[in-house]
Amino acid sequence: MQGHLRLKEGFNKVHEAQEKLDEHEEIDWDFWGEIMADYEHVARTKAKQLSEAIQKGIPGALRGTIWELMSASKDMMLEQVYAELLKESSPHEKSILRDLGRTFPNHEYFQDVQGIGQENLFNVVKAYSLYDPEVGYCQGMPFVVAALLLNMPDEEAFCVLIRLMKSYDLRGHFLPEMPGLQLRLYQFDRLVEELLPLLHQHFVRQGVKSSMYCSQWFLTLFSYRFPLDMVFRIFDIIFATGIEAIFGFAIALLEKNEDVLLSLKFDQILDYMKTGLFDTYKVYESPVSPSERPPTRYRADDFVQDAFQVKVSPFMLDTYAAEYEELLRQQNKHLVEMDTLRNVNRHLSAQVKTLESSLAQLNTEHCDLVKQFVMIKLEKEEMESELVKYKMLYAETMLANEDARSSSRISFLSKRSR
């Protein structure tokens, strides 16, 4: 309640400040004031009028306040938590500092390394890495935070970031393994297959995968490389309708550029995705003078309307999500089977090693026995040879004895006969 009152106070201050300006935005203060008074009531009773107003773009002067209102992020206690987290150090500080200069480097708010823009950006990202250690820090996060900081103070950006992560399910994009991002890339692939079949087939033939170009879109909510006025309009719709709005914008971009993309090859497609997608929405103006080029403007209203023309129903997304979950189950089942087979293989390998060791031991013992057998056999042969010798010697001795006895008898008989 206190947070809502603070938002109302901020709204009133903006109203007063705008009224004092000579040139100010055309804002329907009565309508937006009604929204500030009771957003949920307006959303229920004037849904069409609210949707049309948001599609036309939330007034820049009110954008941050309305984002906070729609996301119900205003939280004084959470802002105090943020202040306490700023006093702590994060293990991700080096990575965060390394990426700061890559975030909107051409925007004046973030250009100065020592400026308030980079300081606030560092503070919010660092504080979140401490607030949610499971997520910690991931590249892409600074772009989301930067878009918030261009519309609100850092403590409020921190609260909105937490709401985006939790209530809008952006957290799944930044968790380890990025499960939410993987799901949405699968859903996006199925949407392209369903709504843009020719382009889908062309991408398949060229080997172009959505992860090659769409990951950055979804990870940063299109704030990476996209024109800021387009980014803010995308954020308007996301805060109003949910994270699923990203599908409408992504499909609209591909559909608007389908003819060009169908004529390109692999490398050309990826280059065009980085630099040429928004040319179709660019407003071409004649320069005021040869030395002065007008700032690049885009037909943001047309872009939003094209996104709303894309028919992406909750049923389609739920169906694709169920398909994806089934694929994961099958993959996990396969992984479990592979793990089981690996465990069985490890067990069998251990058994084989044990048997090989036993066999080696048996072979050693067998060799020893063979050696013993051979030695015994040799000893036996030697003994048999010795026995033969002894038998021959015995026979010779017996023969000699017999001869001696015979000679003795003959001699005795000869003497008697005389």
Image (cartoon, rainbow, N blue to C red):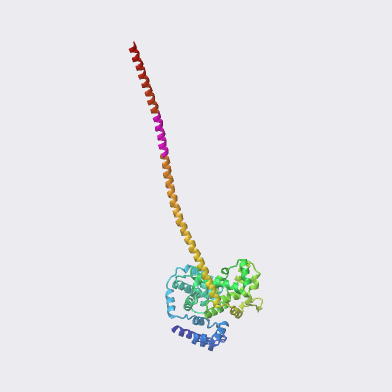
Give x and y (percent) for residue 350. Answer: 44, 54
Is residue 286 in the magenta section? no
Q: Residue at x 41, y 44 (%)?
A: 365
| Nearer to us in this view, 13 or 418 | 418
Q: Position of residue 254 (x, y in %)?
A: 61, 73
Which residues are drawn in magenta? 373-388
Res 381 visible: yes
Residue 304 lies in quadrant: bottom right
Residue ID at (43%, 80%): 76
Residue 30 at x, y = what percent?
53, 89
Horizontal arrangement in the rendering, residue 58 relative to residue 5 (left or right): right
Q: Which quadrant holds the C terminus?
A: top left
Location of residue 336 with respect to 349 vertically, above or below: below
- Please name the predominant secondary structure of the magenta segment in the image: helix
Q: Can you give x and y, in whole percent of width and height, for residue 156 in the image?
A: 47, 79
Relative height, residue 9 to residue 270 (above, below): below
| Identity of the residue furthest to the front in this view | 417
Q: Residue furthest left?
A: 416
Question: Of all residues shown, which one is farthest toward the top?
Answer: 418
Q: Quadrant of the N terminus?
A: bottom left
**Towards the viewer: 198 or 237:** 198
Within the magenta stretch, is there residue 387?
yes
* Residue 19 appears in the figure: no
Q: Which residue is nearer to you in this view: 314 or 398?
A: 398
- Figure disc tally: 0
Classify 209 as above or below 308.
above
Question: Which residue is at 47% across, 57% downward?
Answer: 345
